[in-house]
């Protein structure tokens, strides 16, 4: 990931097999929630990624990298954790997609300005001590668009922390920096992006899903969950805890 604590954790302490295989081996509900996050991000981005070059920073074990590659993008994934990069390579081999992976710090990316059509991140910035610095680097190497999928600063999250459902400090020891979409959008506009769009979603799942998630492999329960999920987000989504923010240049 980006921070040294998180990088060390993903080198030494995480469940390697789970990180390589998620969401494939996690059941129908978990896959739906992960795919929904990616779908929401691509909708606000509004670009056809087929044939485009894409960089994913803080790529972890390559879950979003795989998604971007299957959309036809030529993807490079970077992460500070050597263990994560090794697992991402194994994911690509196991699930038969093509991507390049290398160890790199998101705060000092080893690429020239505007090297990639699109630069994306999924659940990586909130691990960092200075997420805004990472956003600046993403913007620097992006030719056309930036896509950010991260936890949002939200009243629902503050309530979840009080109830013990969400964390302020992760197992790796780093603080969780939830993002303000207005602050990120303002910074990206100053960096030359003409169009900035975001949407929020109410969503919760544990990083490693409990056994009860498998109840929703059954079609009736899965369809019921989806109906409730869409209804909740229709009513409360604008205040949701998950952020999908995209910035694009009119002239790339």
Image: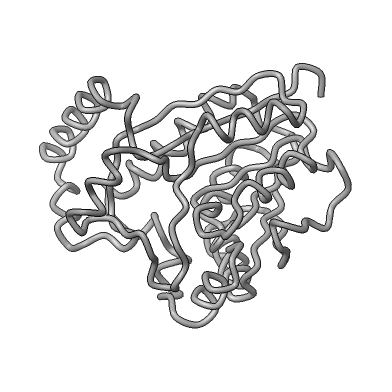
**Above or below, 29 relative to 92:** above
**Above or below, 87 relative to 242:** below
* Image point (63%, 46%), residue name: 132
The quadrant where residue 40 appears: top left
Q: Nearer the viewer, residue 27 or 193?
A: 193
* Image point (16%, 30%), residue name: 228
* Image point (13%, 52%), residue name: 215
Q: Nearer the viewer, residue 33 or 139?
A: 139
The single residue placed furthest to the bottom in the displayed view is 12
Q: Nearer the viewer, residue 7 or 169?
A: 169
Image coords of residue 187 (percent x, y): 66, 33
**Above or below, 100 relative to 181:** below
Looking at the picture, the colour scheme in use is one colour
Image coords of residue 247 (percent x, y): 64, 28
The quadrant where residue 241 appears: top left
* Image point (49%, 51%), residue name: 123
Q: Nearer the viewer, residue 55 or 26?
A: 55
The N terminus lies in quadrant: bottom right
The single residue placed furthest to the right in the displayed view is 112
Q: Total marks drawn?
A: 0
Image coords of residue 238 (percent x, y): 34, 24
**Above or below, 9 relative to 207:** below
Image coords of residue 103 (percent x, y): 71, 67
Q: Is residue 247 left or right of residue 166?
A: right
The C terminus lies in quadrant: top right
Q: Is residue 129 left or right of residue 144?
A: left
């Amino acid at each position: 990931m980006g921070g040294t604590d998180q990088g060390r954790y993903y080198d030494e302490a995480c469940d390697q097999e789970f990180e390589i295989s998620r969401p494939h081996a996690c059941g129908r509900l978990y896959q739906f929630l992960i795919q929904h996050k990616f779908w929401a991000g691509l909708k606000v981005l509004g670009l056809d990624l087929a044939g485009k070059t894409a960089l994913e920073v803080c790529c972890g074990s390559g879950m979003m990298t795989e998604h971007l590659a299957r959309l036809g993008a030529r993807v490079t994934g970077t992460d500070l954790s050597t263990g994560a990069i090794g697992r991402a390579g194994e994911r690509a081999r196991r699930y038969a997609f093509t991507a390049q992976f290398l160890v790199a710090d998101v705060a000092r990316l080893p690429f020239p300005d505007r090297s990639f059509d699109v630069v994306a991140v999924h659940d990586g910035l909130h691990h960092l001590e200075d997420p805004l610095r990472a956003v600046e680097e993403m913007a620097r190497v992006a030719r056309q668009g930036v896509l950010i999928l991260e936890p949002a600063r939200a009243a629902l999250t503050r309530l979840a922390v009080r109830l013990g459902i969400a964390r302020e400090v992760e197992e790796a020891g780093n603080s969780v920096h939830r993002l303000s979409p207005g602050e990120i959008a303002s910074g990206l506009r100053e960096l030359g992006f003409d169009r900035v769009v975001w949407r929020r979603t109410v969503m919760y799942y544990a990083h490693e899903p409990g056994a009860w998630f498998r109840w929703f492999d059954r079609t009736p329960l899965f369809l019921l969950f989806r109906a409730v999920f869409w209804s909740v987000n229709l009513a409360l989504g604008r205040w949701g805890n998950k952020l999908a923010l995209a910035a694009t240049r009119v002239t790339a």
